[in-house]
Structure formats: C-alpha cells, structure tokens
Image (cartoon, helix red, strand yellow):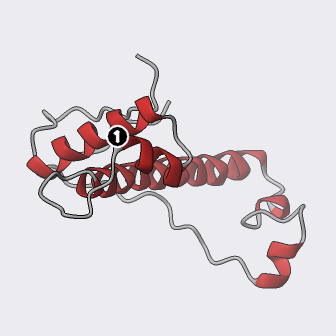
Amino acid sequence: MAEPTPRRNEPRLRPAPLLFEPAAAGADPEHFFDLESIDDPRALLARATELTQAFRAAADRAVEFQAIAAAQLADPRRFDRLTPADIAERAEWTEDYAKKMVEFGRDLLSGTEGGVHVNPADPL
C-alpha cells in the first residue's frame, strides 16, 4: 500500500526521478528504465524500489487531481455542472466511486482533509 501523501502544510518528499525513456528503448518490451542492465541485485533492488515509490507518489498525486477536478465539475455554482453519473461516465468509474471522489476533492479544496491521506480507491 502506498504511503500517505503529505498535506499542504507538510513538505513533500521527492521520489527518485523517473528518467527519460528514449523512444527506441520504449519500443522494446524488455526495456524498463534501464533496470534490465543492472547486474548487481542490491543495486537492482534499490533502483526498482525507488521507481516503485516514485510511481506510487505519482499515482497518489494524480488521484488527488482527479478528485479536485471531479469536485469542480460537480460544483453546484457552475451552470454547466455535472452529475456524479456524468463524471463517472467520463472517468470510467462507478457512480458511487464518483460521489466519493467529489467528496474527497471538496475536502482537498477546502483544506479539511485532516492531515490523513484518504484515497477513495483504498479499501476501508
């Protein structure tokens, strides 16, 4: 499970950089961030762990942006607001998940998330 995402008043830890993948290397299904070229298992474990943490952090941040967008789209003050069903259809979510994401996004926008990262995708 991913580690909690820091809140606005906490500094964000910077995960390992996701190094640029050249187009030719990206076309090779065996090539993945040059991991296949690391012979030392200790170095391989370290770099693979860095990448895992970076992808988790990126995924957590992307979910937060999804939630913010969902909350903005559902804002009743918008003349073109969307229903949770409309948001679910656009994002390929269930309607219940869209409702949770709207609520999560509203919490993020208002700054009342309480300092604990709660991802609607995480099991309770």
Residue 55 pos. (x, y %)? 54, 53
Residue 109 pos. (x, y %)? 15, 52
Residue 66 or 78: which is nearer the viewer? 78
Circle 1 residues within 10 Å: few <14, some 14–19, many ≥20: many
Residue 35 pos. (x, y %)? 77, 59
Residue located at (50% from left, 61% from top): 16
Residue 100 pos. (x, y %)? 33, 33
Tell whether 15 sits left or right of 26.
left
Secondary element at tag 1:
helix
Residue 1 or 103: which is nearer the viewer? 103
Residue 34 position by quadrant? bottom right
Residue located at (31% from left, 32% from top): 118
Residue 85 position by quadrant? top left
Tell whether 53 sits left or right of 62.
right
- Amino acid on which the number 1 mark rests in the picture: Met
State which quarter of the image contains the C terminus: top left
Residue 72 or 8: which is nearer the viewer? 72
Residue located at (11% from left, 57% from top): 77
